[in-house]
Image (cartoon, rainbow, N blue to C red):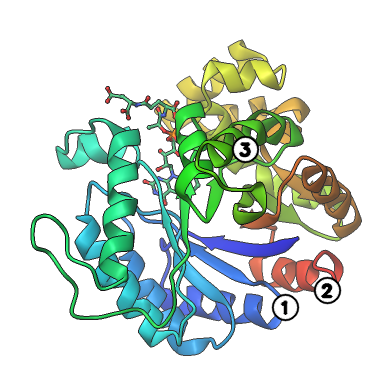
Amino acid sequence: MKFGIEFVPNEPITKICYYVKLAEDNGFEYCWITDHYNNRNVYMTLTSIAGVTNKIKMGPGVTNPYVRSPAITASAIATLDEISGGRATLGIGPGDKATFDALGIEWTKPVATIKKSIADMRTLLKGGRLETGAQLAVKPLTEVPIYMGAQGPKMLETAGMIADGVLINASNPKDFEAAVPLIKKGAEAGGRSMDEVDVAAYACMSVDKKTEKAKQAAIPVVAFISAGSPAIVLERHGIDAEKVETIRGALKKGDFGTAFGTVDDTMMEAFSLYGTPDEVVEKIAALAKMGVTQVVSGSPIGPNKETSIKLIGKKVIPA
Ligand SMILES: C[C@H](OP(=O)(O)OC[C@@H](O)[C@@H](O)[C@@H](O)Cn1c2nc(=O)[nH]c(=O)c-2cc2ccc(O)cc21)C(=O)N[C@@H](CCC(=O)N[C@@H](CCC(=O)O)C(=O)O)C(=O)O
């Protein structure tokens, strides 16, 4: 099992660099930085991380082909690969509606667009020229792995067909029971084996010596995940749709007390990996059985990021 860690650049980059260096020192192999227009720039964050680390792989988790042209992303990831001494990985997904509405970007044909953008980036990163004549003057040090952020069935199949890995916003074996066969179907259609696809659980993680403390730290994140989850996912986990409606309404009004107070254990189990190190190790073993090959520690990581990164490094990541 590989271990990654995710950071949202919504706090000073110096602080994120500190956490990533700590993660590297504690055995994490991948660092994924989210990409939303309203946060700090993903590539400036990654460049700073490259400067303070020497082993951990890093990349956007995930960018999208609408806010930047694939040629701009290819140039950025080639530059990051050079700066980091060959440690760049690229995570790209279809992006999200809220972002494109806010930016006035038309979100059309996400599956077709992702396919084309990955093909174009691979051509450019190999030094090739696009039919438009675009060509990079910078080449990466290595063949940069391209991962896809994916949830929907077609996107998952596409990831199996063309991507080196897939980052799935999910923490529970039931989600991988549904996702892995779709990825496999895509891999087989693309003449590939599943061994070529790194299946990553991009999880809401919360680890602490005390189960209850870990749980309390994860509740706010689980409230937002529950509110953003489609009906098919709520049904899969037997989650009370009425409670989710209450959470959605409360979040909209900024009534976080009601929203967080409505989160129940079914939601916690469905949308987070929380508990003591031993409890989390058990949950990760269940994910491995479903074909997960990388666990990404996503927000909140724990009640205290620094303590939890060390705890995961010592007690969850095998020595
Ligand atoms: C587009 C969407 O794909 P999806 O995989 O479900 O998209 C949900 C998320 O993966 C997507 O919003 C990601 O960008 C969200 N996302 C992030 N999004 C961000 O903007 N920033 C991030 O940092 C980020 C991180 C992230 C990490 C992991 C992860 O799994 C997702 C992450 C979908 O609806 N897919 C369906 C249907 C798509 C479809 O069939 N479309 C047709 C036609 C549609 C049309 O007519 O336009 C087509 O594309 O050709 C499917 O896969 O079956």
Secondary structure category for the residue under label 1? loop
Q: Is residue 280 left or right of residue 181?
A: right
Q: Nearer the viewer, residue 16 or 53?
A: 53
Left or right side of 26 for 189: left
* 1 or 3: tag closer to the N-terminus: 1
CA gap, disc 3 and disc 2: 33 Å
SS at circle 2: helix
Callout 3: SS: helix
Kind of residue sitting beneath label 3: Lys
In this view, the mark in front (3 or 2)? 3
Q: Residue furthest left?
A: 133
Q: How many marks?
A: 3
Q: Which residue is mark 3?
A: 184
Looking at the rendered image, the quarter that the C terminus falls into is: bottom right
Q: Are marks 2 and 1 in contact (CB under 8 Å)?
A: yes
Q: Is residue 177 left or right of residue 132?
A: right
The kind of residue tagged 2 is: Lys
Disc 1 Cβ-to-ligand 1 distance below 8 Å: no
Q: Which of the two residues, 277 or 43, is positioned nearer the viewer here?
A: 43
- Displayed-image quarter of ligand 1: top left
Q: Position of residue 282 (x, y in %)?
A: 88, 49
- Whichever of callouts 2 and 1 sits on the residue coming sooner in the sequence is 1
Q: Residues within 10 Å of mark 2 (few under 14, many from 20)?
A: some
In the image, 83: left or right of 71?
right
Residue 276 in the image, given as x and y percentages of width and height:
86, 55
207 over 49 or under it: above or below:
above
Determine which residue is flagged by label 2.
314
Could you say where residue 183 lies in the image, as x and y percent from the top left?
A: 58, 38
- Residue sitting at the far top: 242
Query: What residue is disc 1 on?
Result: 26
